[in-house]
Amino acid sequence: MLEVEFNSISVLDFITGFILFLSFIFYGLVLQYNKINKEPIYRYYSRGLFFKLLGGLGFAFVYMYYYNGGDTIDYMSGCVAMTNLFFKNPILFFDLIFNEINFQKYISYFDYDTLWPPTHMTKKPENFNVIRIASFFSIITFKSFLGTTLIMAFICYQGIWRCFKLFAEIFPPLTSSLAFGFLFLPSFAFWASGIMKDTISVFCICQIIVSFHYFFFASKKKFTKIIPLLMYALLLYFIKPYLLLALFPGLIFWTSFSRIQKIESKVVRVLFLPVVLSISGFVLVSFYTSSAGGRYGSTQEALETASIIRKDLQRTEQYGDNYFDIGEVDPSFSGMLAKFPIAVVAGLYRPFIWEARSPIMILSGLENLFLLIFTIYSLIRLRIIGLFASTFKDPILTLCFIFSIFVAFIVGFTTANFGALVRYRMPILPFFISYFIILSYLSNENYRQKMIEKYNLRFRRLESPTLT
């Protein structure tokens, strides 16, 4: 069997990519022109789109000419084989789109005219789901790698834009700061713009949050909003189920926020969040590692498998020296909890700047340094109790925090390679940055309110007849 070897970008590919790039930018400028008078937030739309498309092109070129291969190239190779199959036998093509692929179909549906997709991309349903989706874009771009990448980036941007717009509507004074986290963060624009699971995952996460908001809080015709919510949730489940599970606790907290606020005891309200985190974390890990949520028969088996994967990712001859170690992991639930703090730190802040060994890692290291400084500043200013109390005051803030912590833990615990780490934790970046942006804003508001109350009290005392 001869697998597709996609190892260069043709002249036709460049032409297709150039045409699509200009078309998307033109669309963005027209949309911005038509919307900006009524919605000033659209002043960011075309600039954010331009940055996103550049990220997609950069991602494609880096993997093609710097890494000389990788997942995105393998996905595109699978798309080429599927596109060839579509033009040769559409019935077989749609059979693979809607039904599972097995070895018998693999060797019989494809031939030396269509060539075969990379074998390893057909063994995991999540990987082949990406090929299924991207194949439609490959068909309309006539197997253009750059064209397919740009379409993926453009569609992903629509979800990101809707989520940014929602956050900006809830916190209007923070629009420009939130635009940095969602639209102009370099690593986010880079890693979430290629033909990858990460691009689809980010799109789904953003759409789920927006659809959830409209379904529960903003729409009168709620029954019409549940369909896209379920559709995006189902798509995310088929691509990266653990991200969907990590979203659940924050979304549940969001819906019950008003009831929690009615709790009279401030101490109980402050302590409620750690309890929610603990229970949700237990449910998340248990479900993800069970036969329903994962591919293993028990939690113990899944933890042992995670330990084996970590050791595999540390093999120097296969992955180089670009790995990290959180220490010996006891493959048990208690051992997992013992590694929770160090795994979260790894998932959020590594590679540290002194651990970066390549230009891509240096970029991630600089961003991580910024996040680390911002976190330390917030901890010093609010302290641990104050941090939890402030986090509890707003459901969006809580959603960002819970989602970021859970994903950071899963990524930090199961990943040992920096290259995989920066890509796997990428979906949480805009929400983690937004968390600190919103947290700082609410803290400043509280500080200003206290100063106003203190000033008014002092002013009333000065006006009191007993003091004159």
Image (cartoon, rainbow, N blue to C red):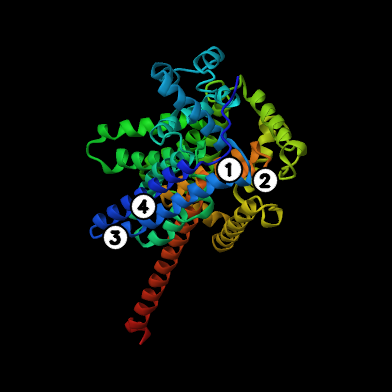
What is the spatial separation of the Cα atoms under label 4 and label 2, in whole angstroms?
A: 43 Å
Q: Quadrant of the C terminus?
A: bottom left
- Mark 4 against mark 3, which lies toward the viewer? 4
Q: Which residue is mark 3?
A: 40
Q: CB under 8 Å between callouts 1 and 4?
A: no
Whichever of labels 1 and 3 marks the residue nearer the N terminus, that label is 3
Q: Amino acid at mark 1?
A: Met
**Could you classify mark 4 by the number of other residues whose Cα lies within 10 Å: few (under 14), some (14-19), or many (20 or more)?**
some
Q: Amino acid at mark 3?
A: Pro
Whichever of labels 4 and 3 marks the residue nearer the N terminus, that label is 4
Q: CB under 8 Å between callouts 1 and 2?
A: no
Q: Which residue is mark 1?
A: 64
What is the spatial separation of the Cα atoms under label 1 and label 2, in whole angstroms?
A: 34 Å
Q: Residue at x 49, y 33 (%)?
A: 245
Q: Which residue is mark 4?
A: 25
Whichever of labels 2 and 3 marks the residue nearer the N terminus, that label is 3
**Residue 342 got which mark?**
2
Q: Can residue 122 be seen by looking at this rendering?
A: yes
